[in-house]
Amino acid sequence: MVQLTIDGQQLEVPEGITVLSAARRNGIKIPTLCAHRSLTPYGGCRLCVVEIEGMRNVQTSCTMPVSNGMVIHTNTEKIKESRKFVLSMLFSERNHFCMYCQVSGGECELQNAALDEGMDHWPLQPNWTNYAVDASHPYYVLDHNRCILCRRCVRACAEMTGNFTLATEERGASTMIIADYGVPLGESSCVSCGNCVQQCPTGALIDRQSAYRGLEPKADHIKSTCVGCSVGCAVDLIVHDNQLLRVEGDYDAPLNGGMMCELGRFKPIFDKQTRIRTPMIRKDGALKAATWDEAVAVIIENIKDKKVAALASTRLPAEALAIFKEFFADDLGGKMVTSIEENFPTQGLNEVRKSGLEGTLKDLRESDCVITIGADLFKSHMVAGFFVKRNLPNGTKLIVIDAGDNQMAERADIFVQPKQGSDYEFLQGLAGNISPEEVNKSTYVNIKSLEDSINLIKAAKKPVFVYGKGLSQQDGKVAEKSPLQALIGLAKSVNGKIFSPKGKANSLAAAAYKLDKPFDTHGFETVYLALGDDDPSNYLIQRLEKVPFLVVQASHDSKLMAKASVVLPVSTWVEQGGHYVNLDGLLQTTQPGTKAPEGVLSNEEALQIVAKASGFALKANWKSELKDYIRE
Amino acid sequence: MAKPKIASDWLAGCAGCHMSLLDIDERIVAIAELVDIRATPITDLKEPDKSGVDVGILEGAVNLSTNVEVAHRMRERSKILVAFGDCAVFGGVPAQRNMCGLQEALRRAYIETESTDSTGHIPDDPELGVPEKVKALHEVVKVDVWLPGCPPDPDAIFYALSELAQGRIPELKDEKLHWH
Amino acid sequence: MSKIRSLVLVSSDPFSINRGAVEVFEAIKKEIAKYGLQDEIEVSMIRDTGRHDIAPLVIIYPEAVVYGPVLVEKVPFLVEEHLLKGRVAAGLQAPQRELSGRIAWISARKGTLPAEQRVVLKNVGIIDPIDIEDAITHDGYQALGKVLSEMTPRAVIDELKRAGLQGRGGAGFPTGLKWDFVSKSTGIPKYIICNADESEPGTFKDRVILEGDPHSIIEAMAIAGFAVGANHGYIYIRGEYKLAQERMSIAIEQARAYGFLGENIFGTGFNFDIVVHSGAGAYICGEETALIESIEGKRGEPRARPPYPTTHGLWGKPTLVNNVETLANVTPIIRNGADWYRRLGTPSSPGTKVYTILGNVNITGMIEVPMGITLREVITIYAGGMKHNGTFKLAQTGGSSGSIIPASLQDTPMDFESFRRAGVSLGSGALLICDENTCVVDLTRVLLNFFRRESCGKCTPCRIGTRKLYEILTHIADGVGTMQDIVDMERIFPPLEQLSNCGLGTTAGTPVAGMLNHFRAEVEAHIKLKICPSGICPMNGSLSKELEKTWISVQA
């Protein structure tokens, strides 16, 4: 611990932190612009300057490490003058006229800082340079006129997501934020995660959807969980007037530290799908609006004494999944009660668990060598991918093993493509159980790549193996030559961890409820599909083509509507609360942000009504069955 | 002691700040009791007294040679000069013209607008003021009090006026200070 | 006015004044006038000479004879003998004992003027830079051998500390202390970086050393590596210095072949190797932390300090960054010892300094002279006087981040300490000497244009402050300046120094400060009378139009 004095207050703070965080921990306010707790200190804007006794010039508190006996003043006349100078410089650089900026009125950190300093005018007028606005991106706009060059977007792009799309070009007053080597954002390598937009302190990066629809200080902030995938990022729902303005990552969450991806951040607010607002029954070949009672009655008719298959989306909360399973499997004794997940993402999980090698996001974040097998963390589970990508410049090695294309490959140290179905042989080769020549013969991977991979893995202190849906399929049975068993053996031999991104948001809960076998609708008279706000895949739609009677419980219009016999309207994740078990086994909750339209029930309520009408009283003890899957 | 005299005028503005002044509603009675309201654009008297006033208030940015004259006249005749609203304080909306240049702005406004026919031309009557680079008021004359806002909040206006009426320089901060 | 033939300097430290220096000064002028020599001989006062025992001193150039103590009654004899008859005034010479500092140097070079004291440039122009054997026959790698076979790392650092060597990059930080910091840092590995990104306008001393004697730098870096415990070195050479890069690469190859670099040097088990890294044209990369970022492959932006490179430098490891000229001083110190070195220069700034002279003088080029000689000496003796018999108006030291030295400071000894006390800086060693035809507004504007373009853009004050200052100066040079512009400049440059992240920003305002301190009337003439006294500034609005064009090009 270090003893220091800030504004006369005697403080004790841990070693190694900065003066700024020492002040903030103790409730002493120092204004900042370029500093952010999720980013490394930069010291560019110079707004956070303080006076430290014994030092000649004022110092930036965001970069100054604390040391014993420091005496710091944060509010002297000199400091106030310095802040005003910095602010007047920034205001005079580009177009910072607040009166028609969309973030003016509380959201703009530049304006707030000026108001806090009591600035009622600018001592120096702007330069009147007009910069082009980059509006090429589908989700957001980069307005250089509002930019203060704090580089928070650039640092977020590099340090948080490891994407390195944003950068600065030129120098001095000509410095500009650019994407890649100066291409429009919309044509760049941007992955649309929007972490830069969330970071921007001014109106330079704003999303197209929420602009001018309500100011953040007047909006409600609801802490919730993203259900875009099984990572389960902690998010802030920003809601105004029962409209979802924005979804932002929660910087205080240890899980994602404020990060999100396109799926979680922009999909909900750019959602153009048509909402289903009323129950519907197919009459004379067309869906007609009906009451809940009418619709449920038709469903009961087609469930009673029929061969029923029940399929649920793993985007549904645990509460709904538990009821779903209890009603269709336990009460009705259905033979095909499962989820619509494809490619068995949680299959074999128990084998990994038994081996004691199961890794978490934390292991992934700290790994010095990541080996992905049939998993593309660029395409899905993007935030988990960010944890890998951002470590690559610091020396973390990446080996991508994928029979098909893989977007992570271009950043990988080694990319190998064993021929389809030969993962087992390749993994055995990595473990040294098969000679390189044999591996080459059965996988077509060249010997050098194999040997390089072996060397990288051996040199690593914390290797993490990420396997995804692409790991050679096992058809539900434990094959003799199981690639997963080979992976376990390999991981054990190099003291590594095995990490699986699993499937959708609640796929682990679905596995706990045993809703994880491959679905098959062949030969069933009625299929009940609890889709919620999930998107039906083409594969699913094909499978449901020939079903005699299809019940769809969904939020949005989709191709399934052409097939459905009865449709029940349900709420989306923004409208309903519930529990989710993420890929690490963390039990997380979502909170309702907006109210569902009238006549639309939650997934849980809809299932309750159907069960009740069938004469079953549901116990609905969703938590007890999850016990083994939850990590504290 | 005689009541302090207040005069106001507008330059390149939209009159919105004066509308916001009227938005102080019945409190204007209280102000009227404290001060002697002289020339304003919304009263009959159009020029501040030659003998001078205590407080001069100017709305709008300086964008024309005539504005410069009005600004200088108000400065000469008032003890305390208030820059009233974002245009006077920062340059505001009119100042956006500086971004594209004067000629382009005039051409767009008088010739290229969708509602202009082939007779459209940039006004060049010698009696008109000459447009120039748009400036904030304090770039042209010394300003004593800045009252920003687009428009300034009626509460802030009332506070500033009542302080000035009682011979104090208003200090705008915290909730009274917000530019929109 | 004809060219002067002699320069007479009278010491004017408090000690000398006490003993009648002012009277001596007046008397000399009177005597010279008596013979009608006032147009041929310049008489001036000189600050501290470092020898108080024989004050007051009179030094006469070009013969560089030192007289002292000179009493006022001896002046007529002195003037008659030396300046009229042209011989040394017998019995008045300063005693030749235990001479130190500046006086020792003047004595040593007597009769050979204009002479230089070549320490750093000893081999430059003498050896074949791409022939290591030539370097070896001229003392090359002797010091390294001595260090590796006879000295401990501690002894090397102590020797440097005793020598009192100060960094020649501009800041004048004690080199021994810096080495000490790095040697005491705990991180491993450590790195040695030679900063050869010489980009100060008008400065080319490092280039001459690199091109003329690359081996002295290799040797010094290896010594530094041994002293601080580093095995890796980088030479960051400015991208435009292709020849220097080429010769340095050849020299490194040769040194490796002779076993002066690489594994197990001289069989002592010490390993050291050097990589040449080329800059890419950014002035800011001469700043040590920006240079480190650049070597790491990042955008050249200075880091926040602390931590300093001595503990967290290249790749986060302890790193010693030294300027070329600083390193070139190391081998002579090791070879000849700290005591020898201390005899050069002044007590507070020992050693020599390489200056590059340019501007309105008769002879431009490079000299190496001891620390502590004055600007007047440089102009009169080495530069051969002002061009076209002009009047000295000001000098600009150390490229852009140096100071404006007005004529009133031309007798201040040029060493770190004296300049610091006078509120100016020595900078990197360029001396841009300007006559009365130079407009100070124009000069400052050109300098600020350089800063505006070369600021890295990281920190607010520097990025915007330099641009604002440049724009204001442009308005003044255009005849559209107002007195408010002076207020605005005075509002900008003090916080610029206080708030900037690195040396560029902190010194970018100094030309403006110097301009306003020493030449305010000239600036006000531009504003109030709308005239440029030197007739340089266009004063017709043309520059502002140019400026606006650059804005438009930004948009395109």
Image (tube, coloured by chain):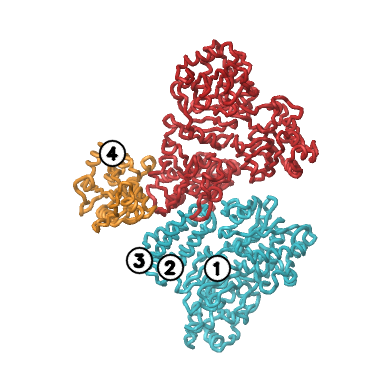
Chain colours: A red, B orange, C cyan
- State the residue at coordinates (75%, 43%): A446
Q: Where does residue A126 sit, x and y in percent of width and height?
A: 41, 53
| SS category of the residue bearing label 1 | loop
* Residue C202: mark in rendering: 1
Q: Work out how far the residue at label 1 is from the one at label 3, CA to CA, in angstroms.
A: 33 Å
Q: Which residue is mark 3?
A: C528
Query: What crowding class fits label 3: few (fewer than 14 Cα within 10 Å), some (14-19), or many (20 or more)?
Result: some
Q: Residue furthest left?
A: B44
Q: Which residue is mark 2?
A: C519
Q: Where does residue B55 sit, x and y in percent of width and height?
A: 26, 49
The label nearer to you, 4 versus 2, is 4
Question: As displayed, is residue C322 above or below residue C73?
Answer: above
Callout 4 amino acid:
Asp
Callout 1 amino acid:
Gly
| SS category of the residue bearing label 4 | loop
Left or right of A192? Residue B145 is left
The label nearer to you, 2 versus 3, is 3
Q: Work out how far the residue at label 2 is from the one at label 1, CA to CA, in angstroms.
A: 23 Å
Q: Pointer 3 indicates a residue of which chain?
A: C
Callout 3 amino acid:
Lys
Question: As displayed, is residue C383 above or below residue C300?
Answer: below
Q: Which residue is mark 4?
A: B23
